[in-house]
């Protein structure tokens, strides 16, 4: 068994070293292999190296949409505030969170526009979590406890690509008695 292991190791070594000659000599422990000839050593005739070409694998090409051609959005939903939920805010600062499929293509100029109580806010957003600030609230919110939000994905020219379902929510303000 040891002899076969040595022979196999020698053949592998020879294949890796560019098919240099391998010499075998014997001592009390058995065969010894070397790449240098020594007294009493004989050259081992090795079979030609078994080489195979790697199979050609076609590269994977992921088609990219042409510049300006957007993959269509399939879903857009407001998850905060919840539909029918209550928000506590004395200043009008309201946190929003949306989910969108596929991801927002902000590198192409797509952004989120917000409609509060049927008034389009002047600032578009590039993230899925953001706040309506008090100034925007004062400009757009109706004087009521009940409010409505809608989010729209718009492209760089302002064209609507997809709209969320409107969310109705209530704003509770703390008062002093």
Image: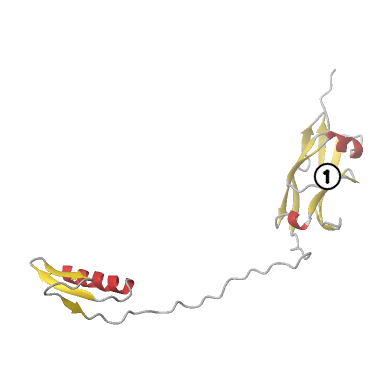
- Tell me, yes or no, if residue 1 can be seen here: no
Q: Nearer the viewer, residue 62 or 121?
A: 62
Q: Is residue 134 above or below residue 73?
A: above
Q: Secondary structure at mark 1?
A: strand
Q: How many marks?
A: 1
Q: Is residue 42 above or below residue 116?
A: below
Write down the quadrant of residue 19 in the picture.
Answer: bottom left
Write down the quadrant of residue 153 in the picture.
Answer: bottom right
- Tell me, yes or no, if residue 95 can be seen here: yes
Q: Which residue is at 47% across, 78% downward?
A: 55
List x then y, in percent, for residue 70: 76, 63
Q: Which corner quadrant holds the N terminus? A: bottom left
Tell me which colouring the rendered structure shows. Answer: secondary structure
Circle 1 residue: 149
Q: Which corner quadrant holds the C terminus? A: top right
Q: Which residue lies most toward the top here?
A: 177
Q: Which residue lies most toward the left here?
A: 28
List x then y, in percent, for residue 160: 84, 57
Q: Which residue is at 17% across, 67% downward?
A: 2
Q: Nearer the viewer, residue 123 or 148?
A: 123
Residue 15 horizontal side relative to residue 28, left or right: right
Residue 106 horizontal side relative to residue 39, left or right: right
List x then y, in percent, for residue 135: 87, 35
Mark 1 surroundings: few (<14), some (14-19) or many (≥20) residues within 10 A: many
Write down the quadrant of residue 175 in the picture.
Answer: top right
List x then y, in percent, for residue 75: 74, 56
Q: Which residue is at 25% across, 69% downward?
A: 9
Residue 93 horizontal side relative to residue 28, left or right: right
């Amino acid at each position: 068994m040891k002899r076969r292991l040595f022979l196999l190791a020698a053949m592998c070594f020879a294949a890796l070293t560019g098919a240099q000659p391998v010499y075998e000599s014997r001592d009390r422990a058995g065969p010894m292999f070397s790449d240098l000839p020594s007294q009493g050593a004989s050259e081992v005739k090795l079979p030609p190296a078994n080489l195979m070409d790697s199979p050609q694998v076609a590269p994977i090409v992921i088609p990219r949409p042409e510049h300006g051609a957007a993959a269509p959005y399939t879903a857009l939903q407001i998850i905060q505030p919840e539909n029918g939920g209550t928000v506590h805010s004395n200043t009008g600062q309201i946190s929003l969170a949306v989910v969108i499929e596929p991801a927002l293509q902000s590198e192409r100029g797509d952004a989120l526009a917000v409609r509060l109580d049927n008034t389009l806010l002047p600032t578009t957003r590039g993230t899925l979590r953001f706040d309506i600030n008090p100034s925007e609230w004062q400009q757009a919110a109706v004087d009521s406890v009940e409010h409505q939000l809608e989010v729209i994905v718009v492209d760089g020219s302002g064209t609507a690509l997809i709209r969320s379902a409107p969310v109705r929510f209530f704003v509770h303000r703390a008062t002093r008695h």
